[in-house]
Image: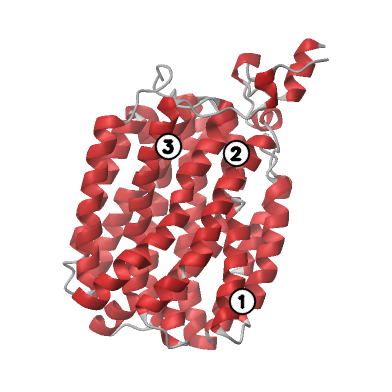
């Protein structure tokens, strides 16, 4: 039996979806650059305020405490007031607090400002993913989100290239002022040019939001993202300091070395989004093998004897882990109606940001007590957590919706696949 052409090809992004992806890519890029700058500035901040590595880790983790706490409220705000409005609020407010980071005159003030910065950025992820869901079809959704989320890895390239020279020549404060100014321009672009949703989206009913937030199934997906982000934020926080303190590299040289792993991670995030669409979710098919490879690479990285070997194994570890990014979100975002995707994305992202709370401080403590080898070895815990949870979560839309006691989706709402066409033509 012949299969219709549209069933044999992956759904392509239309013009509205492409504009959405471009604008939200820029928003996520500046979001990530804003929070990565402090990792590059940590050695300078530590010298100025006379901080131990544990205290430097706290300066990073305090952001994630607020950022994590605001994920679920941020998604609920997006469901209630609209994704575009909440995205714009977040962009403008976090740009202000990025600039205020550069004005901090003491460690205590720095902690307060970074906490408030985390609040502002914390309402953004759920709103952003909801905005993509509203402007794409289910078959486009994870590919589009994969392109948007690849900005995180691109930011890991951009941040050191931009911030490291600024810090080296003008001091660490100049980097925060500069990226804050860019954030204001991105805010204006999103406000002016983000397309309207594909269809009118009603505010989420309270009962639906409660179902999402109370779902043990969604909390398992959040736990998967927790494991993933232990790896990502552990590496992002401590690799620049490790290369500077232990390998004797300048901040600029460390930034240049970050290009290879960040570039590989960019490709991996995009590929993971496409795999998620191809497999219609099924996180086990991607997350388990990816985290197995990442675990081995992390152990080899932690025991590497040369800088070249360290960077090479880090590249393998971060790119393998990054394949898991979009598959972790795939089943919930493909399966829930648009009016509930903000709360769901916020809940899953909350789990990930708990990894950002735990990893920087835990690794700082381990680095002080036992050295960086033990600190980097700790990251294997994240890979194990993600892989185990990938095996026990629902693998497709039908099993996910049944776990949440939601009705099966209408045929017109499901992505077009060969299997679906054959079933409907039988």
How many residues crowd around disc 2 within 10 Å: few (fewer than 14), some, or many (20 or more)?
many
Mark 1, Cα crowd under 10 Å, few <14 / some 14-19 / many 20+, is: many
Instruction: Give residue 301's mark.
Output: 1
Q: Position of residue 387 (x, y in %)?
A: 69, 55
Res 37 quadrant in image: bottom left
Nearest to viewer (mark 2 / mark 1):
1
Label 2: which secondary element? helix
Q: Earlier in the sequence, mark 1 or mark 3?
A: 3
- Does the CB distance between marks 3 and 2 fall below 8 Å? no
**Quadrant placement of the N terminus:** top right
Residue 226, how many percent across, how many down? 55, 55
Q: Marks 1 and 3, how far apart in space?
A: 34 Å
Give the labeled residue for mark 2. 330
Q: Is residue 80 above or below residue 261?
A: above
Indicate the quadrant containing the C terminus: top left, top right, bottom left or bottom right. Answer: top right
The image quarter in which residue 380 lies: bottom right
Residue 369 visible, this orientation? yes
Indicate which label's residue lies in the foreground, 1 or 3: 3
* Mark number, residue 243: none
| Lower position in the chain sequence, tag 2 or tag 1 | 1
């Amino acid at each position: 039996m012949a299969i219709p052409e549209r069933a044999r090809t992956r759904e392509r992004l239309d013009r509205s979806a492409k504009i959405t992806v471009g604008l939200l890519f820029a928003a996520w890029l500046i979001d990530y650059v804003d929070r990565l700058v402090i990792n590059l500035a940590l050695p300078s901040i530590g010298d100025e305020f006379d901080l131990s590595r544990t205290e430097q880790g706290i300066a990073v983790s305090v952001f994630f405490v607020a950022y994590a706490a605001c994920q679920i409220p941020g998604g609920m705000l997006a469901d209630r007031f609209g994704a575009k409005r909440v995205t714009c609020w977040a962009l403008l407010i976090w740009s202000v607090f990025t600039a205020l980071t550069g004005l901090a005159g003491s460690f205590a003030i720095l902690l307060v400002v970074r906490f408030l910065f985390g609040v502002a950025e914390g309402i953004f992820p759920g709103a952003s993913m909801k905005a993509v869901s509203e402007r794409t079809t289910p078959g486009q959704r994870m590919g589009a989100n994969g392109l948007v989320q690849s900005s995180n890895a691109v930011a890991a390239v951009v941040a050191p290239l931009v911030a490291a020279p600024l810090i080296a020549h003008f001091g660490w404060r100049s980097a925060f002022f500069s990226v804050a100014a860019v954030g204001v321009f991105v805010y204006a672009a999103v406000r002016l040019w983000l397309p309207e949703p594909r269809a009118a989206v009603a505010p989420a009913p309270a009962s639906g939001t409660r179902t999402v937030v109370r779902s043990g199934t969604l909390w398992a997906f959040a736990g998967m993202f927790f494991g993933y982000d232990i790896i990502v934020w552990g590496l992002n926080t401590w690799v620049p300091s490790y290369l500077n303190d232990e390998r004797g590299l300048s901040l600029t040289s460390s930034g240049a070395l970050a290009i290879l792993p960040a570039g590989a991670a960019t490709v991996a995030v995009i590929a993971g989004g496409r795999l998620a669409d191809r497999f219609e979710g099924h996180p086990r098919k991607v997350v388990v093998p990816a985290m197995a490879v990442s675990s081995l690479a992390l152990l080899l990285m932690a025991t590497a004897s040369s800088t070249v070997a360290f960077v090479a194994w880090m590249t393998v570890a971060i790119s393998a882990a990054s394949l898991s990014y979009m598959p972790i979100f795939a089943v919930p975002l493909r399966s829930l109606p648009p009016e509930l995707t903000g709360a769901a994305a916020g809940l899953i992202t909350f789990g990930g940001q708990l990894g950002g709370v735990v990893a920087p401080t835990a690794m700082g403590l381990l680095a002080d007590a036992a050295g960086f080898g033990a600190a980097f070895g700790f990251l294997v815990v994240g890979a194990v957590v993600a892989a185990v949870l990938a095996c026990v979560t629902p693998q497709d839309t039908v099993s996910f919706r049944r776990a949440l006691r939601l009705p099966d989706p209408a045929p017109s709402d499901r992505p077009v696949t060969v299997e679906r066409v054959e079933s409907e033509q039988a």
